[in-house]
Amino acid sequence: MNRTEPLVLGIETSCDETGIGIVRGRTLLSNTIASSMDEHARYGGVVPEVAARAHLEALQPSIEAALAEADVALADIDAVAVTSGPGLAGALMVGVGAAKALAVSLEKPLYAVNHLVGHIAADILDADAEPLEYPTVALLVSGGHTSLLLVRDLTSDVEMLGETMDDAAGEAFDKVARLLGLPYPGGPQIDRAALEGDPKAIPFPRGLSRASDMAAHRYDFSFSGLKTAVARWVEQHQAAGQEVPVADVAASFREAVVDVLVTKALNACRDYDVPRLLLGGGVIANKRLRDVALERGESAGVTVRIPPLSLCTDNGAMIAALAAELIMSGHEPSTLAFGADSTLPVTEIHVAPS
């Protein structure tokens, strides 16, 4: 196996997007994504069984499309990589099964890697960015995860500082959008509605930000109370026969989420004396979040890194990139004994041979 610039095919099926990526070392060759979002829209959220079935249908054509885009053959691949967790168990099982079949049939090594750490590895594929320095604080914000990590080394030392204790930020966006009569997915809809609103119109709460919360939950997140506060505010206006100012509600809600995310991330940078913050996950597509992070980061003397948005959503390229880093660092491949692990801890960067 080429350990200098390994050619790796990555498979990502942790939620509703079938991602196949191919990288050569730190060079992105292909990033193919097949989303089943439209199938979930009728239910207002991701249905695990629907997602798993969609992965089954999308895997083969996605692999073929990725190989064609990268202009390589399966026989050229040095290693196969796959997300083993965290994520939806049924969805993960589809990707894990496919990766094992490919690795066995091709007689290639297989790397089972962590989905969350993969989001950090996506930054490596930005050809226009300076090399990622360590340590760095990483804020990962998606539909299923809101996590704050301390990355001392991408392939060997990642620590969970805090995470969501209930709804992830992306879930909160979806639920509030539904309250306001906006379609799924909620993130882009809230963003669009907020353009005409006043972010200071309604003082929605900042979860786990009071002094009494900070001792035990300084880096943790909670958006359930915020969602409930929005629901009560809307219900009170409707009960009084008043028109709900959707734009103001959307803007004020979004500001509350962004404020908490950025404040806690910069607190971690200050507390650990790390002048770098990496953003990742699909919710990073929210322009207000990016703008506030860049503005407040500059004021705090923290460099904020944001990978290309095409690499922020769940994708196979980030999985391939993480595996390539593991290979180039001398880590051994996983055995076939691993399975899908919906609660895989972030400290387990890859499922190492026992």
Image (cartoon, rainbow, N blue to C red):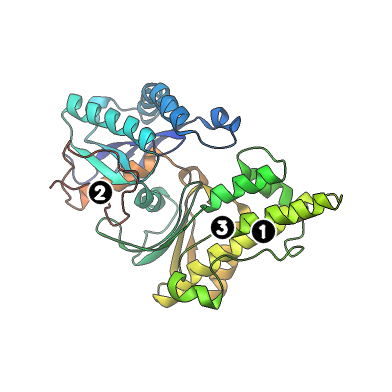
Question: Could you say where residue 291 lies in the image, as x and y percent from the top left?
Answer: 61, 60
Where residue 169 sits in the image (x, y, percent)?
54, 53
**Residue 305 locus on image (x, y percent):** 47, 59
Count of labels in the image: 3
Find disc 3 in the rendering and name its residue.
Answer: 223
Q: Which residue is located at x 21 percent, y 35 percent?
A: 78
What SS does tag 2 mark?
A: loop
Residue under label 2: 350
Earlier residue among tags 2 and 3: 3
Cα gap from disc 1 to disc 3, whole angstroms: 10 Å
Q: Is residue 220 left or right of residue 316?
A: right
Residue situated in front as seen by the camera: 76 or 173: 173
* Numbered disc 1: secondary structure: helix
In terms of depth relative to the viewer, which is nearer, 269 or 242?
242
Is 12 rendered above or below residue 329?
Answer: above
Separation (CA) of disc 2 from disc 3: 30 Å
- Residue 187 appears anywhere in the view: no
Q: Which is nearer the eye, 221 or 199?
A: 221
Q: Which residue is mark 1?
A: 229
Question: Of callouts 2 and 1, which one flags the residue occurring earlier in the amino acid sequence?
Answer: 1
Amino acid, disc 2: His
State which quarter of the image contains the N terminus. top left
Query: Which x, y percent locates residue 200?
Result: 74, 65
